Image (spheres, helix red, strand yellow):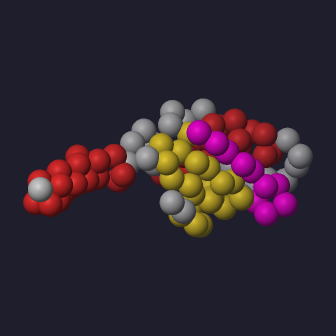
Amino acid sequence: MNKYLTAFALVSSMMLAPAAWAGERTVTFAVDNMTCASCPFIVKNSMAAVPGVAKVAVSFQAKTATVTFDDTKTNPAAIAAASTNAGYPAHPVQQGS
């Protein structure tokens, strides 16, 4: 009986493992050229428009944007490009889970 339970657990974990590899990630970007109070809104809107982005928090004071996204739909380079194309060059400085 224990052999069957062990085999079932192993097969179950193998079937669920690919889902664990993909999913939500959070990355913090340094954002250049933010000089006025409206800049964070433009950065936030440009990054949020990237398909797969779930949440964007922009700090004018720290000149950063923290973005949570689905890594099966987008990546940090695409998010940085969206901000850069809006006139605010961005690059990842911290990658989270």
Can you say which quadrant of the picture contains the N terminus?
bottom left
Q: In the displayed image of the protein, which residue is found farthest to the front?
A: 1
Q: Position of residue 56 (x, y in %)?
A: 67, 45
Describe residue 6's horizontal placement relative to residue 50 as left or right: left
In the image, residue 76 lies in the stretch drawn in magenta: no
Name which residue lies at 50% across and 37% down: 52
Magenta region, main secondary structure: strand
Asked if residue 5 can be seen in this view, the reply is: yes
Rendered view: 94 above or below 52: below
Name which residue lies at 39% across and 42% down: 72
**Foreground residue, 77 or 27?**
27
Describe residue 54's horizontal placement relative to residue 8 as left or right: right
Q: In the displayed image of the protein, which residue is found farthest to the bottom?
A: 93
Describe residue 7's horizontal placement relative to residue 20 as left or right: left
Name which residue lies at 62% across and 59% down: 28
Q: Position of residue 48 (x, y in %)?
A: 63, 37
Q: Position of residue 91 (x, y in %)?
A: 58, 59
How many numbered dots are placed on residues in this image?
A: 0
Magenta span: 54-63
**Foreground residue, 16 or 52?**
16
Rendered view: 91 above or below 88: below
Name which residue lies at 79% across and 55% down: 59
Q: Position of residue 61 (x, y in %)?
A: 84, 60
Asked if residue 7 can be seen in this view, the reply is: no
**Foreground residue, 2 or 51?**
2
